[in-house]
Amino acid sequence: MRNGSNSSGDDFGSAYGTGDVVKVLFDSKNGTLSFGKNDEELKEAFYDESFKQGGYVPAIGTLIEGSKYGLVLPDLED
């Protein structure tokens, strides 16, 4: 995984491939974006106060053919 794009930016975590499950947590309450792979714990990759302003829409993309996507929404009652 990389910060920025597939070909540039700082490395963040190990590479992923076919069969891996990549987890992404966007926490607008705390202003963080975290990533994890398979059974790894999520690691905070970004913090930005502007994340707390809301108005974001989830989008997913990859260059791996045959990838499958899913979206899990958190319990927002907290």
Image: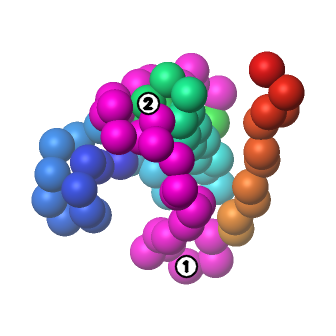
Residue placed at 75% from the left, 59% from the top?
A: 70
What residue is pinned by disc 2? 31
User: Based on the displayed image, in which of its 4 quarters is residue 68 positioned?
Assistant: bottom right
Residue that extends furthest to the front in the rendered view of this protein? 53
- The part of the chain drawn in magenta is 39-67
Instruction: Locate residue 54, reporting x and y percent.
Output: 52, 47
Callout 2–callout 1 Cβ contact below 8 Å: no
Color style of the picture: rainbow
Q: Residue 35: tell me if it is visible.
A: no
Q: Is residue 25 above or below residue 66?
A: above
Query: What secondary structure is marked by label 1?
Result: loop
| Quadrant of the frame with the C terminus | top right
Residue placed at 70% from the left, 64% from the top?
A: 69
Instruction: Locate residue 46, reporting x and y percent.
Output: 33, 33
Residue placed at 52% from the left, 57% from the top?
A: 56
Disc number placed over residue 65 in the picture, else none:
1
- Give 14 or 41, whichever is nearer the viewer: 41
Residue that extends furthest to the bottom in the rendered view of this protein? 65
User: Based on the displayed image, in which of its 4 quarters is residue 73 positioned?
Assistant: top right
Instruction: Locate residue 52, reporting x and y percent.
Output: 46, 36
- Give 32 or 36, whichever is nearer the viewer: 32
Distance between mark 2 and mark 1 Cα atoms:
32 Å
Residue 55: in magenta span: yes
The residue under label 1 is which amino acid type? Glu
Tell me the crowding category of disc 2: few under 14, some 14 to 19, or many 20 or more residues within 10 angstroms, Cα based. some
